[in-house]
Image (cartoon, grey):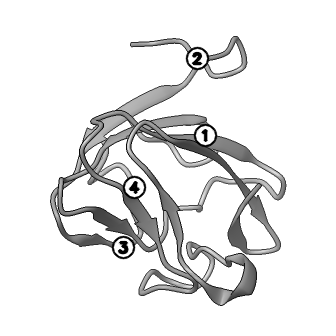
Amino acid sequence: MATYDAGFCNEVSVTLGASTYNNVGASTITGYRSGSTNSIGVTANSANSTITGFDCSGMADGFTFLIHEDGGVGSIVFPHLGASSTGNQFKNMNAGSVVIPPFGAARVTYKNGYLRFA
């Protein structure tokens, strides 16, 4: 397990297909713990992988985590208010999708019932 920052001590990783993933949690990512996992390494499919939300059941308001694309061949797409359950969705600026390119990273904060990119 790579350590990106001393503050990221609960890192997990997952390889995703060219599909849409809703309410991503422990059933999708081995070792994921909502409100505790603070670094998620994703190997996206070359045709891109879409995540509409994460299981936020254990997240306190203000909890922040890092998502990074580690595979180098595909992007991760996060649509605004996608198909995930309310409270697990991304609320993006300008109501558009956020895309993390190959080897890119972004911080996400859980705030007021939504996931928001910093």
Could you say whether the residue bearing mark 4 is in a helix, strand or loop? loop
Q: Does residue 30 appear in this view?
A: no
Query: How packed is label 2: few (under 14 Cα within 10 Å), some, or many (20 or more)?
Result: few
Q: What is the x, y in percent for residue 62?
A: 84, 53
Q: Residue at x 63, y 53 (%)?
A: 58
Badge 2 amino acid: Tyr
Q: CA distance from mark 2 to mark 1?
A: 10 Å
Q: Residue at x 17, y 65 (%)?
A: 18
**Compared to 114, does 102 lie above or below?**
above
**Compared to 55, does 20 lie above or below?**
below
Badge 1 amino acid: Leu
Question: Tag on residue 66?
Answer: 1
Question: Tag on residue 25?
Answer: 4
Residue where numbered disc 3 is placed? 22
Dots 1 and 3: beta carbons under 8 Å?
Answer: no
Q: CA distance from mark 4 to mark 3?
A: 9 Å
Dots 4 and 3: beta carbons under 8 Å?
Answer: no
Q: Nearer the viewer, mark 1 or mark 4?
A: 1
Residue 91 or residue 94, whichever sits in front = 94
Query: How packed is label 3: few (under 14 Cα within 10 Å), some, or many (20 or more)?
Result: some
Question: Tag on residue 4?
Answer: 2
Dots 2 and 1: beta carbons under 8 Å?
Answer: yes
